[in-house]
Amino acid sequence: MRRFSLSLLVFITACSPGGAQDGGKKAAAPPDALAVSTIEMAPRSVPVSFEAVGRTEGSREVQVRARVSGILERQLYNEGDAVAAGAPLFRIERAPFEIELAQARGVLAEVLARQELSEQEHERLKGLADRRAISQKEADQASSAARQSLAAVQVAQARVRQAELNLSYTNVTAPIGGITGRALQSIGSLVSPSNDSALLTTLTRGDPIWVRFALSEAEYSRLRGSGEKNAQVEIELADGKPYPSKGRLNFAGSTVDGTTGTVQMRAELPNSKHVLLPGQYVRVRVLAGTQQAFVVPRTAVVQNETGRFVWVSDGGKATPRPIRAGSWLGADWVVLDGLKSGEQVIVDNLVRLRPGMPVQAKKAG
């Protein structure tokens, strides 16, 4: 009985108006403000930069081809070596072309002798015609024969020159200085300029080296407005190390690719030690002057399905602020739009923030 009376008393007390008011006060109590660190926004001078992924290529890439038909007799270089322009690479069998040249020179000697005789005959008959000792027809025939002999000499001289040229083509030399590729034809193979066997090897000039990449249409417009001609190019290697030398732009496309919405670009960089090889993927950064912008730590920028944003302390409450981010600047991110001078950007406890949550801001150390 005493237990029943005690339970009834507790129940009545809980249901009394005073008890209900106490519970309501506890439910309506505001949550404690979350302590956060902030940085005050102030514009500063930052470089105008654009980043992209590029691929290296030789500043000149040449296919070395056979220009006459014959048996490949010798390979005169080591694959992968650097060679100078004019260095011998291959030799094609010479004997057939030496014979051809000898025949052409013999024919030339023959027609030269005939031309000399026809000239003498022409001069002799010309004198007789002047004295009317022979008919004009005979004199004209002699003159025509002399001109025909002269034409035959010119044809024979051209054939000698062609034979000399063909003979010179049996020595295959490097058209440019560069790095040699692998030999594509084996010694003893029959090569011909009229089929696939003509390609003997390739040469690539790696100093300077080119880097091909693409910028979006918006980035290219900003680059043109910032001074495209004076822009510098930096690259970062696959292992994250910066390349020590800077380059310059030497080509910009004249059209926008309708599929990707990008403009093709190309940069040229010195590469005397051949640190960069054609075909490498690198990260490209184009620097084109400076601009005034806000800078926030990378860790302060959040991204969701709608885009990037930061949290700001506005009147003691957390407020998400959409931004338009530019390029990275060391450990920071350049903000091009979305923030104002004097705003306090929250840089920690981001995962606990909710819109309108009370925050207690202190300046980041």
Image (tube, rainbow, N blue to C red):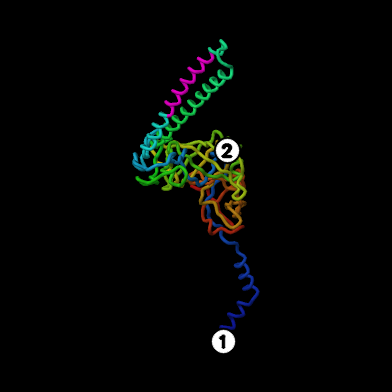
- Which quadrant of the figure has residue 169? top left
Q: Position of residue 351 (x, y in %)?
A: 53, 58
Packing grade of label 2 (10 A; few <14, some 14-19, many >=20) is some
Q: Where does label 2 land, which residue?
A: 291
- Magenta-colored stretch includes residue 156: no
Numbered tag placed on residue 219 in the rendering: none
Which quadrant of the view contains residue 90? top left
Name the image quarter holding residue 304. Answer: bottom right
> Residue at the location (40% across, 34% down)?
100
Q: Taking 22 as reference, is 279 above or below it?
A: above
Q: Is residue 73 visible?
A: yes
Instruction: Name the spot of residue 191 as percent of width and height, x first.
Output: 41, 44
Say whether residue 115 is magenta: yes
In the image, residue 85 sits, relative to residue 69, either above or below, namely above
Q: Quadrant of the N terminus?
A: bottom right
Q: Which residue is mark 1?
A: 4
Q: Main secondary structure of the magenta part?
A: helix
Is residue 65 or residue 330 the one in the foreground? 65
Question: Nearer the observer, disc 2 or disc 1?
Answer: 2
Disc tally is 2
Instruction: Say if mark 2 contacts mark 1, CB within 8 Å.
Output: no
Secondary structure under the numbered disc 2 in the rendered image: strand
Identify the amino acid type marked 2. Gln
Q: In the image, is 158 to the left or to the right of 226? A: left
For the residue pair 241 and 82, the one nearer the viewer reads as 82
| Foreground residue among 257 and 165 | 165
Which segment did they paint magenta? 107-126
Dot 1: few (<14), some (14–19), or many (≥20) neighbours within 10 Å?
few
Residue at left offset 49%, top offset 29%:
155
- Out of 13 and 97, give the one closest to the viewer: 97
Amino acid type assigned to the residue bearing label 1 in the image: Phe
Q: Position of residue 89 (x, y in %)?
A: 37, 38
